[in-house]
Image (cartoon, rainbow, N blue to C red):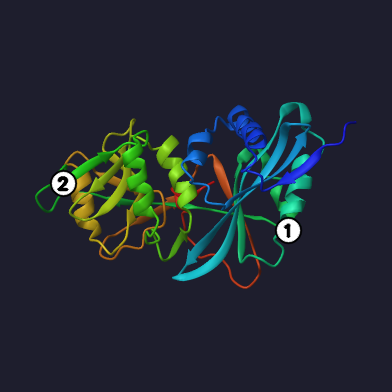
Amino acid sequence: MKELQWVKDYLDDEPRRNHLFALAGQIFGLRFETWYQLGASNKSYIPFSYFDEDKAVANVSVNLLDMIIDGKVKKAIQIGTVMTHPKYRNRGLATSLMNQVLEQYEGKYDVMYLFANRSVLNFYPKFGFEPVNEQLFSLEWSFGQQSLKGEGIRSLEGNNKEDIQFIARFAADRKPVSQRFGTANDQGILMYYCLNVFSSNIYYLEQEEVIVIYKQDETMLSRLDIFDIISRKEFNIETVLSRIAGPDIKQIVFHYTPDYKGIQLQPSIFKGSDVLFVKTNGAFSLPTQIKHPITAQA
């Protein structure tokens, strides 16, 4: 059997980077090149890969960021892009790479975590990760005041160079979306979502000076989903909601852990396709009833 080469932290090596991105496109349909050329990786995305000559065949990536828990900053590592080429599976490559990551970062983090597809839930507990149930938070919405919907809102497009540069500059010194449970120094992941996932769902509220990523549910038109609110200062959440939610909206769902004062939120069990797995240094535990910010999920 031909010996594979283990390589890490090589995004500056264009040929290898191209092979890694091609594998990510083949396995997950991910599109990394524009994101990389934008500079969004910011050295915080570190791949650990096996190569067969010049071909990337397996990978586990490390994303360096901070986790905010009850206002306190925890050093975090989020694992992502765990993948193996179909022809190289059942050879223990992902296990080997996970062990390499754990060894490299031992004692260097407060919390390490990842999101796993439900088809591989038995894999990660072998490394000390435990599943955590997430919640979605919703708000029953009705107008007690005149609607401000549409006023002072500018659409931003993820495929527009000027818009994406504006978002990147704005997000560089953003406040965490939640002090109860949020993330920081996660701009690289956010920019991937702006480029590839929510490119047509980004809006700048000029008066409030916030960027809101949201859209109306396609199957339940009375529901509005908010994926992120990017701000540099405190803002009034009810004013923001009154600008983006018209009289047809009856329910607003937050895809993160809101900690706004003055609004009544209802938690419900999140039944998404991915499960959050967490491994801490043992010095603390996560709070209950949380939702990891979707735009910081690798």
- Label 1: how many residues lie within 10 Å, few (<14), some (14-19) or many (20+)? few
Coordinates of residue 19 in the picture (x, y in percent): 66, 32
Which of the 4 quarters of the picture holds residue 94? top right
Would you say 125 lies left or right of 296 here?
Answer: right
Would you say 56 lies left or right of 139 here?
Answer: right
Look at the image and tell me in which quarter the N terminus lies.
Answer: top right
The amino acid type, in three-letter code, at marker 1 is Gln
The amino acid type, in three-letter code, at marker 2 is Gly
Say which of 103 and 5 sits in front.
Answer: 5
Coordinates of residue 28 in the picture (x, y in percent): 58, 32
Q: CA distance from mark 1 to mark 2?
A: 48 Å
Label ID, residue 104: 1
Residue at 78% from the left image edge and 40% from the top image edge: 93
Q: Is residue 294 visible?
A: no
Residue at 78% from the left image edge and 30% from the top image edge: 88
Say which of 214 and 205 sits in front.
Answer: 205
Q: Is residue 166 visible?
A: yes
Which residue is label 2 attached to?
152
Indicate the secondary structure of the residue bearing disc 1: helix
Relative to 47, does residue 54 appear above or below in the rendering?
above
Label ID, residue 133: none
Residue at 36% from the left image edge and 42% from the top image edge: 164
